[in-house]
Image (cartoon, rainbow, N blue to C red):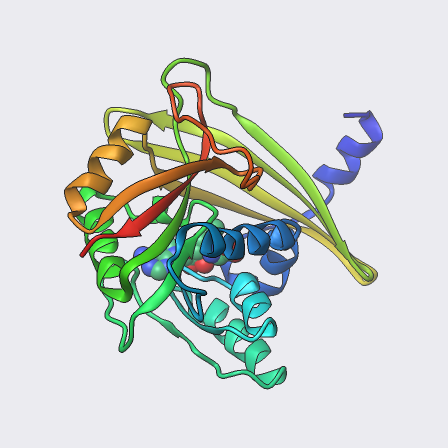
């Protein structure tokens, strides 16, 4: 970092707030991978389902960037999230574009759906917000009751590798019109015994009217490959049928071992 950029960044007004309370910024920061994720979700339907999927469900859907993209392709979609601001943002966008405002506020470890869906997805680590084995298992069981037998749950999890040092920082930028956001995420603390990892995350938001930084902390439960395998088996609802990296390359499934970090589990509902 140059001394100029240091001055510029330390001069930013700092707001210690949840990134999830800023759906507009969140949606831009995490929107970049949307196309690859959608191709992957639909591709999994083609590869692993016995019939073409029609209904999709996303627990912890946030702003619904993926739900919205699927609705635009003509699919029936629904989702839930704990954050009311994210759900308001998501439903407002669906309504604005003529779709059903089909997402609602709920806890992903304690919910019921009125119908069963073909594919559930949870692609970027949201599952790790559940802080205990009980909550995580309850989530998998709720999902087991929400997806039809033979249907899929695509669960993306950043694992803690056991054979190589874990990666500690990540930075990326996103721009839409006059709004640009530089995001930086870093590890603050790892407690493998308690299975808690704390990450700092900041959005440096630049608009023509001024710049500021949103500073937040994410507390996530950690999983090694064997811990998540054990949990999936113990839920009694799911079998793992394939694993991929966050490159979302359907031609390149991966073998999960102690060096892997970003893994998408393709789970099939056996209930
Ligand atoms: C990393 S964001 C992912 C949002 C969305 N799935 C996406 O791909 O953009 C994590 C989301 O999990 C939600 N969340 C955290 N704990 C939750 C819970 N217990 N039940 C439902 N949603 C939860 C947060 O409010 C946040 O919107």
* Residue 4 appears in the figure: yes
Identify the residue at horizontal 56%, vertical 78% (top origin).
94
83 left or right of 178 in image: left
- In the image, farthest residue toward the front: 50
Position above or below: 135 against 90: above
Given residues 126 and 26, the one toward you in this image is 126
Residue 133 found in image quarter: top left
Position above or below: 77 against 18: below
In the picture, the quarter occupied by the N terminus is top right
Give x and y (percent) for residue 228.
Answer: 28, 35
Given residues 49 and 92, the one toward you in this image is 49
Identify the residue at horizontal 24%, vertical 67% (top origin).
111
Position above or below: 7 against 122: above
Position above or below: 269 against 195: below
168 left or right of 72 in image: left
Give x and y (percent) for residue 219.
Answer: 38, 41
In the picture, the quarter occupied by the C terminus is bottom left
Give x and y (percent) for residue 169.
Answer: 57, 29
* Residue 19 appears in the figure: no
């Amino acid at each position: 970092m140059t001394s100029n950029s240091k001055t510029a960044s330390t001069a930013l007004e700092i707001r210690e707030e949840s990134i999830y309370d800023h759906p507009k910024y969140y949606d831009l920061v995490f929107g970049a991978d949307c196309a690859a994720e959608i191709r992957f979700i639909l591709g999994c339907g083609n590869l692993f389902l016995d019939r073409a999927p029609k209904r999709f469900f996303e627990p912890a859907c946030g702003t619904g960037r993926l739900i919205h993209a699927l609705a635009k392709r003509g699919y029936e979609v629904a989702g839930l999230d704990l954050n009311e601001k994210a759900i308001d943002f998501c439903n407002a966008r669906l309504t604005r574009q003529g779709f059903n405002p089909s997402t609602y506020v709920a806890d992903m470890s304690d919910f019921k759906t009125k119908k069963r869906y073909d594919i559930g997805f949870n692609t970027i680590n949201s599952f790790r917000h559940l802080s205990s084995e009980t909550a995580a298992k309850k989530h998998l069981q709720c999902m087991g009751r929400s997806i039809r037998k033979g249907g899929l749950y695509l669960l993306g999890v950043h694992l803690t590798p056991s054979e190589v040092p874990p990666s500690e920082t990540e930075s990326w930028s996103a721009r839409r019109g006059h709004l640009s956001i530089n995001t930086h995420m870093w590890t603050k603390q790892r407690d493998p015994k308690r299975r808690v990892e704390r990450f700092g995350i900041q959005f440096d938001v630049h608009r023509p009217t001024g710049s500021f930084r949103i500073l937040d902390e994410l507390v996530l439960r950690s999983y090694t490959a064997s811990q998540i395998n054990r949990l999936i088996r113990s839920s009694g609802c799911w079998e793992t049928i394939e694993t991929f990296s966050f490159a979302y390359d359907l031609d390149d499934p991966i073998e999960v071992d102690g060096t892997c970090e970003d893994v998408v589990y393709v789970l099939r509902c056996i209930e």
